Image (cartoon, rainbow, N blue to C red):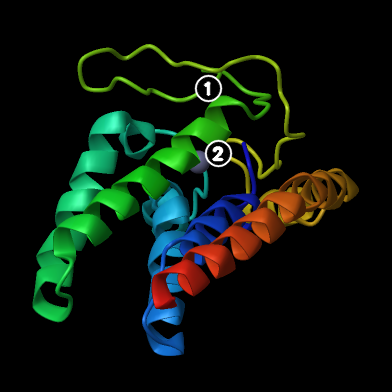
């Protein structure tokens, strides 16, 4: 699976592409898209609460239908604060989907391999198998907190993180540059 940094970089790149009227609006877009790109991994939270970090991870939140659920939640909140709630909800749903895409192309070392993309219509797990990204290790269900912490801060994870940053940094730069061009054309 990809790290929160890798997912967050995908959200950041998207936020740099979308025109924003002010620095505050830009920061809101960055926050929304980075959180959206990581939201599928919120399934760690209930496991943390019962001291079994991984027990619910890679469950239904890693399905396409949850991208629509996330978009609906964002729309409910955004319509109170924004004049473009449908656009924001659509983009938030797409960045939620970017998480599924990156996990699909990531490596996975424990069964069931991959993510349940089509839950609840199918319980099958899907993974591309190319393992383009090295995959972040964070233990397996039933592991103690000390085992999970040791894996999270392992040399393997730092190497995988470095690869993710190297692979995605050029994309951020391209998006930042393209965003500048869009903004200057809009203001001309
Ligand atoms: Zn994930």
Residue placed under numbered mark 2 in the picture = 142
Q: Quadrant of the N terminus?
A: top right
Q: In the rendered image of this protein, does residue 168 appear above or below residue 49?
A: above
Number of on-image labels: 2
Residues at discs 2 and 1 in contact (Cβ within 8 Å) = no
Q: Is residue 39 left or right of residue 1?
A: left
Q: Is residue 82 left or right of residue 110?
A: left
Which percent across, then down, holds residue 78?
Answer: 17, 70
Q: Is residue 180 visible?
A: yes
Is residue 101 or residue 18 the one in the foreground? 18
Q: Quadrant of the C terminus?
A: bottom left
Q: In the rendered image of this protein, does residue 55 appear above or below residue 149?
A: above
Q: Element type at marker 1?
A: loop
Q: In the rendered image of this protein, does residue 164 appear above or below residue 85?
A: above
Q: Nearer the viewer, mark 2 or mark 1?
A: 1
Mark 1 packing: few (<14 Cα in 10 Å), some, or many (20+)? many
Residue placed under numbered mark 1 in the picture = 114
Q: Is residue 56 visible?
A: no
Is residue 137 or residue 176 the one in the foreground? 176
Q: Pick whichever of labels 2 and 1 is earlier in the sequence.
A: 1
Q: Residue at x 10, y 70 (%)?
A: 79
- Location of residue 75 (image quadrant): bottom left
Q: In the rendered image of this protein, does residue 4 appear above or below residue 101?
A: below
Q: Residue at x 71, y 23 (%)?
A: 131
Which percent across, then down, holds residue 185?
Answer: 47, 68
Q: Residue at x 42, y 61 (%)?
A: 33
Q: Tell me the CA gap for discs 2 and 1.
A: 19 Å
Which percent across, then down, holds residue 108?
Answer: 65, 26
Mark 2 packing: few (<14 Cα in 10 Å), some, or many (20+)? few
Q: Is residue 61 left or right of residue 155?
A: left
Q: Element type at marker 2?
A: loop
């Amino acid at each position: 699976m990809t790290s929160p940094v890798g997912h967050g970089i995908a959200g950041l790149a998207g936020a740099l592409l979308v025109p924003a009227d002010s620095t505050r609006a830009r920061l809101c877009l960055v926050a929304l898209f980075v959180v959206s790109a990581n939201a599928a991994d919120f399934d760690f939270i209930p496991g943390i609460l019962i001291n079994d970090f991984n027990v619910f991870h890679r469950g239904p939140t890693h399905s396409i239908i949850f991208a629509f659920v996330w978009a609906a939640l964002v729309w409910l909140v955004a319509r109170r604060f924004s004049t473009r709630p449908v656009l924001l909800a659509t983009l938030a749903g797409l960045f939620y989907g970017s998480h599924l895409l990156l996990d699909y192309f990531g490596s996975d070392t424990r069964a069931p391999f991959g993510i349940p993309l089509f839950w609840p219509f199918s319980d099958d797990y899907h993974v591309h198998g190319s393992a383009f990204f090295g995959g972040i290790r964070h233990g397996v269900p039933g592991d103690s907190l000390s085992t999970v912490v040791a894996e999270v801060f392992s040399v393997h994870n730092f190497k995988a993180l470095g690869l993710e940053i190297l692979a995605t940094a050029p994309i951020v730069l391209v998006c930042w540059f393209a965003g500048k061009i869009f903004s200057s054309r809009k203001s001309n």
